Image: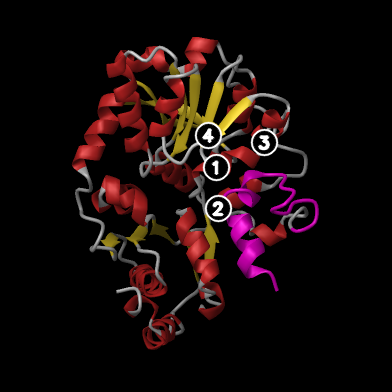
Amino acid sequence: MSNQLRDSAAVKTLTNKLARLERPIRIMEVCGTHTMSIGRWGLRKLLPPSLQLISGPGCPVCVTPVSYFDALWQLPDVTIAVFGDLLRVPGSHGTLENARARGMDVQVVHGPEQALKLARKRATVLAAVGFETTTPGIADTIRRAAEEKLDGFHVLCGCKLVEPALCALLDGKPDIDGFLLPGHVSAITGSNAFDFLPRDYAASGVVAGFEPVDILAALVLLARMICAGEPGVRNAYPRIVTPQGNQHAQKLIRDVFVPIDTEWRGLGIIPASGLGLAPRYAHLDAARHYGLSLDPVPEPPGCRCGDVLQGRMLPHECPLFAQGCTPSSPVGPCMVSSEGSCAAWYRYERA
């Protein structure tokens, strides 16, 4: 299957179709894996000048605000369980890597269930960040902790929902003609979850996979819809994504979480865009248990991650890009995360 989806003849056929675009269009991808795949396969270089791809708020680490990382520094003497990309994101006091060097017990985990193992030995806070893709696993871990009556386990929840962020972008009337929709998120939510795009905004979107042919075929379909003036949502990833999505995972999210207003880096506070713990699990909320402050905090000086996440600026247009901000010495999260647009641009798109 992967050979077919990387076939050079198919890629050429699809790029030839895109070369015949009737007018200039701007498409935003809202998935960090798409951002990395586009860079890795050099797809941007194959596109005609009339089609511009821009990155949006598709990286969960990147949209997590400074206040979240500062809250982790407020924790008492406990174990902090984090996913790897969070370790090097700068906050006001430094990174969690710096915190570990100063003696804080920061442990990298590869899945939320590992935090349960840590909590059975010592009080542990899971730094839970992610979109709908990773949220079901976090929800299941919270449910299990409650069933075990594991008093030493708490969660600082930074989970977010994609739909409200897209609405916030569109409410700002950006220069975006359509969306390359996230395949991983859509596997959970279903493609029908994006029907609000044509219904409420007369906008178009296509759910795409991550191989070169996946992405280019989705772009062809999306470009045709845009040029024809026929807003809609299409699923170009049917081998993984269904219209209804994973309903078991959706129920798990609904059972454990409730929508809350939450802060996004660059986008501010978006109503009902985050997930807080439902009342029956509220005792596991680290912010409540430890009295943590999550008040908004200014961005690092000179960091333009917020503009990049809104599609207002390409990564290389930031004055700090590849100068004061590099993967080895990042200023903002877009240069840190494995799904960050600045990291992808630095690795694949530099001349």
**SS at badge 2:** loop
Residue 97: image tag: 3
Q: Of callouts 2 and 1, which one flags the residue occurring earlier in the amino acid sequence?
A: 1
Q: Nearer the viewer, residue 317 or 223?
A: 317
The reply to whether the C-beta atoms of the residues labelled 2 and 1 are less than 8 Å apart is yes
Residue matched to label 4:
82
Question: Is disc 3 surrounded by few (<14), some (14 to 19) or many (20+) residues within 10 Å?
Answer: some
Which span of residues is magenta-colored?
Answer: 322-351
| Residue 48, visible in the rendered structure | no
Q: Looking at the picture, does residue 209 appear above or below residue 335?
A: below
User: Is disc 3 placed on a helix, strand or loop?
Assistant: helix
Task: Calculate the distance from the C-alpha at mark 2 to the C-alpha at mark 1.
Answer: 9 Å
Name the side, left or right, on which 170 lies relative to 198. Answer: right
Q: Residue furthest front?
A: 121
Q: Residues within 10 Å of mark 2 (few under 14, many from 20)?
A: some
**Contact (Cβ within 8 Å) of mark 1 with mark 4:** yes
Residue at numbered disc 1? 84
Q: Nearer the viewer, residue 242 or 107?
A: 107
The reply to whether the C-beta atoms of the residues labelled 3 and 2 are less than 8 Å apart is no
